[in-house]
Amino acid sequence: MYDVIIIGKGPAGISTSLYTQRSNLKTLVIGKDKGALEKADKIENYYGFSNAISGSELLENGIEGAKKLGVQILTDEVLSISYEDVNNYKVTTKEGEYNTKTLVFATGTTRKTSNVENVEKFEGKGVSYCAVCDGFFYRGKDVAVLGAGDYAIHEATELVPLVNSISLLTNGAKKIELRSDKIKVYDNSVKRLKGEETLEAVELDDNTVIPISGIFIAEGTASSTDFAKKLGIQTENNYMVIDDKKMTNVPGIFAVGDCTKGLKQISRAVADGAIAGISVKEYLRNIK
């Protein structure tokens, strides 16, 4: 059992870990990549650097410093988060499962979009972004999952016990092998969603029409908004809503950096991490 798991290994996440680790809290940082900052060629407006530094170098310096303090850093993709009990969250990744008393989201800016025609038209009328949240409403029906990664496979697997059949639409991305009588994989590109008032079918680029009652968007990796919906975290314009201690409306869950509303700067992300790290320590002290 970890005291805190931080999702995201950019400046906000690593800054948080420095404070939690120095408070003698068992800390795990999980991140698939280092985010958009890794692509920055030159950073010239960050305190303490008289010469320009690349985003990649700044990130590596931060990670190395955290490791020297004893922070565990795992390169992996988070697929789902669930409640086990009060102050006991289970984080499921591609490689394993981890339990923690508190969570800190440092996942960066949400990038949940789809270029499929009519997705916005049917949002709330057959288009969903959360299998755990909305799967219940499609009991015994035919549905689809849009996506080709591990997140899409996880969402499809969540739906298997509930629905009649699942069409996994890779949208031309790649071939997926799945062993389930309920899941059929289509590799063609998705042309459009079809229906009158509610979603009725999906059309592929070879003119194949698949009748469905709902489709779950799971392209790319799970975003902060995806996790927020599943955990009951309040959001506003796809940002997690937090208080002055960086805590969300769900006790023990915090959010820092670009997944919350505010200035998109490294200095702000680092400051958020410092506040969250101290807040996590105070929170755990109060529940003991």
Image: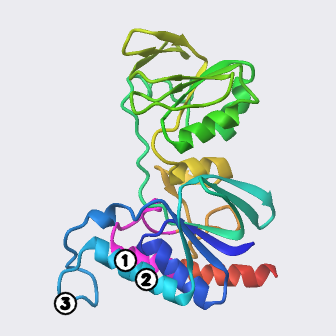
For residue 108, side relative to residue 100 (left or right): left
| Colour pattern | rainbow
What's the residue at 40%, 48% (across, down)? Answer: 111
Question: Nearer the N terminus, badge 2 or badge 3?
Answer: 3
Query: Magenta segment: does it hold 271?
Result: yes
Q: Nearer the viewer, mark 1 or mark 3?
A: 1
**Separation (CA) of disc 1 from disc 3:** 18 Å
**Separation (CA) of disc 2 from disc 1:** 6 Å
Is the residue 5 above or below the residue 94 in the image? below
Q: Quadrant of residue 262?
A: bottom left
Q: Quadrant of residue 117?
A: top left
Q: Which residue is mark 3?
A: 50
Contact (CB < 8 A) between labels 1 and 3? Answer: no
Q: Which residue is mark 1?
A: 60
Q: Would you call the spot at circle 1 few (<14 residues within 10 Å), some (14-19), or many (20 or more)?
A: some
Residue type at tag 3? Ser
Is the residue 128 above or below the residue 213 in the image? below
- From the viewer's side, name the closer residue of 118 and 60: 60
Contact (CB < 8 A) between labels 2 and 1? Answer: yes
For residue 56, side relative to residue 227 (left or right): left
Question: x%, y% of residue 73?
Answer: 54, 73
Instruction: Specify the segment rendered in magenta.
Output: 256-275
Residue type at tag 2? Glu
**Separation (CA) of disc 2 from disc 3:** 21 Å
Question: Nearer the N terminus, badge 1 or badge 3?
Answer: 3
Question: x%, y% of residue 140?
Answer: 74, 19
Is the residue 13 above or below the residue 26 in the image? above
